[in-house]
């Protein structure tokens, strides 16, 4: 569990600098240079991600179960998960979706974390998905008092929403076809069919 916690601290910590002190981040970027700052960010985030994957895998060997979700909750999760990836892509393909939601990537992260938190009830699950959900909520709140940093996006185009939806559903199909099990070692719990 320690590896998971350290990984979360590194990964979410790297993504929280602008939440905690955007001014300090700007000072450090000016002092170190954009390339050095981004390299340090990527290294810390990747180290955190690796520790999360390793720690989560270790924790699953002897899970501490806090709750077990009813079948209908799992069925609901599978029905809502296809919306996560188009929302994430909409952040990079500006259109109606990004205009309505303002921060579609954060909406996608919150939806993804909430759905997984509802279904997975081990201590490791609660730590992982609960931490990511808390981070996404904190980031969204912080954006009310700071300017969002520009991210590279596709140029505005009338088909951007369609592209985001198509790419999102393509990712979902890959995950359903075995990608999720390959990445996590766990199959997707398809809706329960009685009888």
Image (spheres, rainbow, N blue to C red):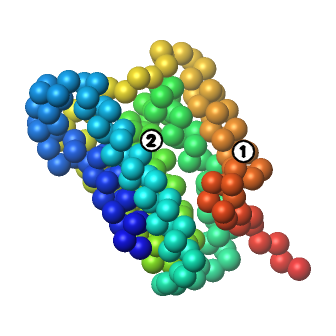
**How many residues crowd mark 2 within 10 Å: few (<14), some (14–19), many (20+)?**
many
**How many residues crowd mark 1 within 10 Å: few (<14), some (14–19), many (20+)?**
few
Percent coordinates x, y for residue 40 in the rendering: 29, 37
From the viewer's perspective, is the residue at label 2 or at label 1 nearer? 1
Residue 135 or residue 3, whichever sits in front: 3
Residue 88 or residue 186, whichever sits in front: 186
User: Which quadrant of the figure has residue 110?
Assistant: bottom left
Q: Give me the C-alpha separation between circle 2 and circle 1.
A: 20 Å
Q: Secondary structure at mark 2?
A: helix
Residue matched to label 2: 105
Image quadrant in which the C terminus is located = bottom right
Percent coordinates x, y for residue 103 in the rendering: 39, 39
Residue matched to label 1: 174
Please tell me whether residue 28 is drawn above or below residue 137 in the rendered image. Answer: above
Percent coordinates x, y for residue 130 in the rendering: 40, 66
Q: Residue furthest right?
A: 195
User: Which quadrant of the figure has residue 157?
Assistant: top right
Taking the image as drawn, is residue 89 in sight? yes
Tell which circle, 2 or 1, labels the residue nearer the N-terminal end. Answer: 2
Q: Residue at x 73, y 45 (%)?
A: 173
Q: Secondary structure at mark 1?
A: helix
Q: Residue at x 60, y 20 (%)?
A: 159
Please tell me whether residue 79 is drawn above or below residue 161 in the rendered image. Answer: below
Residue 75 or residue 66, whichever sits in front: 66
Percent coordinates x, y for residue 150 in the rendering: 32, 26
Q: Is residue 167 left or right of residue 40?
A: right
């Amino acid at each position: 569990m320690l590896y998971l916690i350290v990984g979360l601290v590194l990964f979410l910590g790297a993504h929280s600098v602008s939440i905690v002190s955007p001014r300090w981040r700007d000072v450090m970027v000016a002092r170190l240079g954009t390339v050095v700052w981004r390299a340090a960010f990527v290294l810390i985030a990747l180290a955190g991600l690796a520790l999360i994957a390793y720690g989560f895998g270790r924790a699953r060997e002897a899970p501490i179960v806090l709750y077990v979700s009813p079948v209908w909750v799992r069925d609901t999760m599978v029905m809502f998960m296809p919306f996560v990836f188009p929302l994430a892509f909409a952040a990079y393909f500006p259109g109606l979706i990004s205009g309505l939601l303002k921060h579609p990537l954060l909406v996608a992260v919150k939806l993804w974390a909430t759905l997984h938190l509802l279904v997975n009830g081990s201590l490791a699950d609660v730590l992982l998905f609960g931490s990511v959900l808390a981070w996404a909520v904190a980031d969204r709140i912080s954006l009310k008092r700071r300017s969002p940093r520009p991210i590279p996006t596709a140029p505005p185009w009338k088909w951007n929403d369609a592209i985001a939806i198509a790419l999102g559903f393509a990712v979902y199909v890959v995950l359903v076809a075995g990608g999720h099990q390959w990445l996590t070692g766990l199959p997707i719990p398809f809706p329960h069919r009685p009888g």
